[in-house]
Image: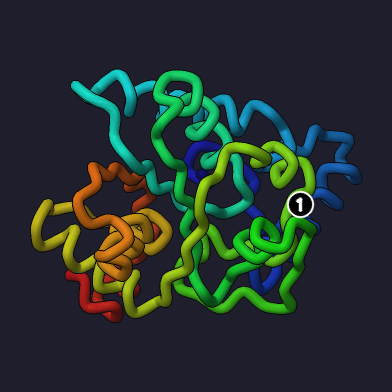
Amino acid sequence: MRALGANVRLFGADFDAAKTEARRVAEALGARFVEDSRDVETAEGAGTIGLELVSALDEPVDDVIVPLGNGAMLNGIATAVRALSPDTRIVAVQASGAPAMTETLRAGRIVETRTADTIADGIAVRVPVPEAVSDMTGLVDDALLVDDAAITAAMRRLYASAGLVTEPAGAIGVAAVAENPARFEGRRVATVICGANATPEQLSGWGVV
């Protein structure tokens, strides 16, 4: 991003701290702050994944498993899949160390957590976006949590069997299937594998490559 001329500022210990600072900087500069899952464009872009998924398959799948962070990707994909394949179940999956959105869905109210402790930093949300939670109403059929050990095992499996190098958040759907075999036995399942934002040092430390 810097090579393309962007002014990149690193701030905070987690996603939500960085977002708070980004909002402050945008206000100070008089710039528009585009917030993942609050601004509709982020969900609309993700919706194209759902369109491509359904159109690429010769028959509907029983479950689509989607990584859940702030919710833009899930809401976009789920909206498209619901419209084109209404019998397909939408399953959200998060890291057990950052369960705020899953706890919010289960409780029916906003649940914030004090920390987000997971290697899956791409979906490590502490403070749910109310608009995104509202948009999920009627879209999500189930929500699962998996731990970091299951995530790294899924990353290693994807690299060994498919030659794919993913970040933790991108592999979490595969981890959910591996950790819940009875839940998905006999069902046709699709998941979204996205994101490769991991350093060589991280991948080596996790035993992926």
Which image quadrant for residue 15? bottom right
* In the displayed structure image, the side of residue 187 where residue 26 appears, left or right: right
Q: Quadrant of the C terminus?
A: bottom left
* In the displayed structure image, the side of residue 132 where residue 77 appears, left or right: left
- Residue drawn where x is 23% and y is 42% of the image: 188
- Residue drawn where x is 45% and y is 24% of the image: 48
**Vertical comparison of 42 with 155: above or below:** above
**Vertical comparison of 142 with 83: above or below:** below
Residue 27: image location, x then y, percent: 89, 43
Visual colour scheme: rainbow
**Vertical comparison of 174 with 41: above or below:** below
- Counting every numbered tag in the picture gives 1
Q: Observer-nearest residue: 50 or 161? A: 50
* Residue reaching furthest to the left: 161
Q: How crowded is mark 1: few (under 14 residues within 10 Å), some or many (20 or more)?
A: some
Residue 153: image location, x then y, percent: 25, 73
Residue 78: image location, x then y, percent: 51, 34
- Residue drawn where x is 35% and y is 43% of the image: 63
Residue at image mark 1: 22
Which image quadrant for residue 40? top right
- Residue drawn where x is 37% and y is 54% of the image: 170
Task: Please tell me whether mark 1 sits on a helix, a strand or a loop.
Answer: helix
The amino acid type of the residue labelled 1 equals Ala
Residue 65: image location, x then y, percent: 39, 48
* In the displayed structure image, the side of residue 184 where residue 131 appears, left or right: right
* In the displayed structure image, the side of residue 36 where residue 57 appears, left or right: left
